[in-house]
Amino acid sequence: MVDNQLVLSNVQCFTTAKFGKVASKLLKTLLLDFYDVQDLVDAKKQLLSDIKGTSTTFRLFQNDATVSVVWFVVNDIFTLLTFLDENLQLNQFPNYVADGPDSLPSTRLYKRDLGVLMKLLEKMDGRIMDLRSWVPFSVS
């Protein structure tokens, strides 16, 4: 177990803090929307480097910064974290830290957007019900 070792990685700080607490699909979307390709690639390299420093063996296709589909990089990070979590080895890694709160995305933005959408749908439903009460029905 690594004690008190801190590693500066905004992506890993956010990902490990939210991993298992936020739905994977939302978390992946947040990462893709907020961070650029190089940040994600660097985070994956950092995680692979940290894995090499332990007794864990894991083989993963190596993507580099020229990969046109950044989704694979994010999926690789989640594959690694899932593997480590399932094998109870996440505690063997250093604490990932961010250089400031502005370097981390906010999940509230996404939750709030969904809340706004739900309120809009409720209002529309109410208006549709009002309109139905005005429409004359013909009985055959």
Image: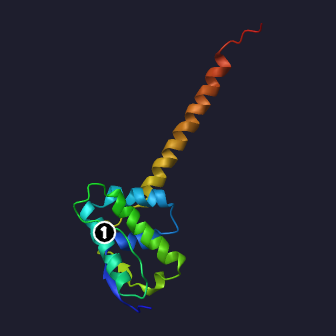
The reply, left or right, for residue 35 in relation to residue 130 is left
Is 138 situated above or below 128? above
| Image quadrant where residue 96 sits | bottom left
From the top left corner, tell me how far across and down residue 65 is, in percent.
23, 64
Identify the amino acid type marked 1.
Gln
Is 54 situated above or below 17? below
Q: Nearer the viewer, residue 98 or 123?
A: 98
Q: Nearer the viewer, residue 2 or 87?
A: 87
Residue sitting at 28 percent across and 67 percent down?
41
The reply, left or right, for residue 106 in relation to residue 23 is left
Residue extending farthest to the left is 66
Q: Is residue 47 visible?
A: yes
From the top left corner, tell me how far across and down residue 89 is, in percent.
49, 83
The reply, left or right, for residue 122 in relation to residue 117 is right
Question: So how many labels did they put on this image?
Answer: 1
The reply, left or right, for residue 137 in relation to residue 59 is right
Residue sitting at 38 percent across and 74 percent down?
13
Colouring convention used in this rendered image of the protein: rainbow
Residue sitting at 47 percent across and 85 percent down?
91
Is 127 situated above or below 42? above
Q: Which residue is mark 1?
A: 62
Q: Nearer the viewer, residue 9 or 89?
A: 89
| Image quadrant where residue 72 sits | bottom left
From the top left corner, tell me how far across and down residue 78 is, in percent.
43, 67
Residue extending farthest to the right is 140
Q: Is residue 100 visible?
A: no
Residue sitting at 47 percent across and 52 percent down?
112
Say which element carries label 1.
loop
Q: Nearer the viewer, residue 4 or 60?
A: 60
- Quick one: label 1, few (<14), some, or many (20+) residues within 10 Å? few
Q: Quadrant of the N terminus?
A: bottom left
Q: Quadrant of the C terminus?
A: top right
